[in-house]
Amino acid sequence: MYEGTVSRGDQQVALWGSTFAFTVCFAVWTIFSIIGLQIKQELHLNDTQFGLLVATPILTGSLSRLALGIWTDQIGGRIVFTGVMLCAAAATWFLTTMSTYGGYLFAALLVGIAGGSFAVGIAYVSKWFPREKQGTTLGIFGAGNVGAAVTKLAAPLVMVAWGWHAVAQIWAAVLATTAVLYFLLTKDDPGHVERRASGAKPEPFLKQLEPLKNLQVWRFALYYFFVFGAFVALALWLPRYLVGAYGLDVRTAGLIAAMYSIPASLFRIVGGWLSDRVGARTVMYLTFSVSAVCTFLLSYPTTTYVVSGIEGPIEFTLAMGVVPFTVLVFVLGFFMSLGKAAVYKHIPVYYPGHVGAVGGVVGMIGGLGGFLLPITFGALNDWLGVWTSCFMLLFVLVASALTWMHFTIRRMDRRRFPQIQADTDLPEFTEMINATQQARLAAANAAAAAVAAAAAAEAVAACSLRARGTSRT
């Protein structure tokens, strides 16, 4: 719960400290997108095995979000966030002791706890700010997704110079240092302080789960499956895609992949601001519509056509080069970042007392997208043998989400305004009909008022005549 008495300084420390900590956590969470390329070469993994390896941390980070979000509401985000970072740092260092595929998968499960920090930060930061600023505030915090770009830009340089073990060890040391600084500099959130001062007990775990009975929560979760789950999946998969589809080296592939991760992270702040100004629904429509166009264009494979011409066969090829590919993934990342902020704009508004639980389950489903999609990408590569098959899957996913959202909103509008069912589908015609109906109603009311006034005048005149007759008698 936001308390208006908290100082602006404490608010800013909570917001920016949590954002920096989440950035470091996200860099660790996506570390396999780079070091996994070296491990793939060492162990001679196929694409399905590689997809499972890079996706395994996402599984732990996703499944842990619900419990971590609820614990944040119960015992405070400062303690939980610090504990998550220390555990993830230890797991990342432990990763360097493994040498087999099974060992790497086990270590990746432990490293994944870093991804659970999102649910902790959302629940913690939201308690420091009023409702009208939730979109912008949570958008700033969510921009910590840029940690994926940090890994893509810095990890290849470290890996080429000193090997992938150095990447894991440096990332672990930075995360542990961040945990200590975070605990020392931040304070407990206002709601936790108030509850501790009053001696009130935190809401029971099962009580926190009650909002999950609402279908609306799961609808938000499905939206997040695309805007966040697909973001994480592509952040993990793009280096592999660029190396395989375009023959780029790992450093160039990491740089181009960062061109996707950076806008898909930083512009989340813009998405939060837009959600506060024009509404989350409008932002979601923009996100899904533009994403559908981008994924459709990206999904078109290199194709050679032969046309029977007048003077013989005419052959031409349709293919997307690296430059247009980079532009399209930049646009895709930008609009996905807007959608991520728009989804989380709803949660503190609809469920202010259960941000941890609701935000945790929405983040969990979104994170599961980041786990399932890379595995599916690899399986599609092995099955179909077409590099763009990953974007084909994303197009189907976003088109389904857009259709489902639109018809849900139409159904809600029909419940609120039953007259829409009898009107035409075009909104401008609906407005004209409504205006005509209102004009007719106003004219009818005016006519009725005129008739009533005339009747009243006649009654007054009749009474006056009677009075005159009586006085003469």
Image (spheres, grey):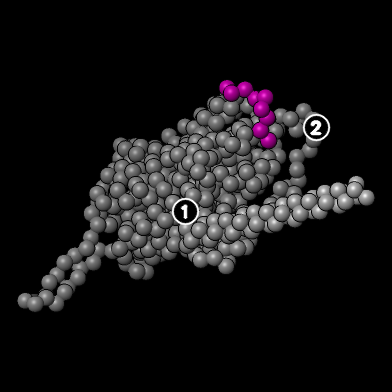
Amino acid type at mark 2: Gly
- Residue 427 sits above or below residue 161 on the image: below
Residue drawn where x is 52% and y is 30% of the image: 16
Is 462 left, or right, of 212 in this rendering? right
Is 36 left, or right, of 136 in this rendering? left
Question: Which one is in front in this view, the residue at disc 2 or the one at disc 1?
Answer: 1
Q: Nearer the viewer, residue 2 or 206?
A: 2
- Residue 421 sits above or below residue 469 on the image: below
Query: Residue 26 at x, y = what percent?
Result: 47, 41
Residue drawn where x is 32% and y is 58% of the image: 298
Q: Which residues are magenta?
A: 1-9
Q: Nearer the viewer, residue 455 or 102?
A: 455
Amino acid type at mark 1: Tyr
- Residue at the farthest left position: 311
Please rate how many residues cluster around mark 1, counting C-alpha atoms within 10 Å: few if below 14, some from 14 to 19, many from 20: some
Residue 204: name its quadrant: top right
Label disc, if present, on residue 199 of the rendered structure: 2
Question: In the rendered structure, which disc, 2 or 1, sits on the residue that comes first in sequence?
Answer: 2
Residue 291 appears anywhere in the view: yes
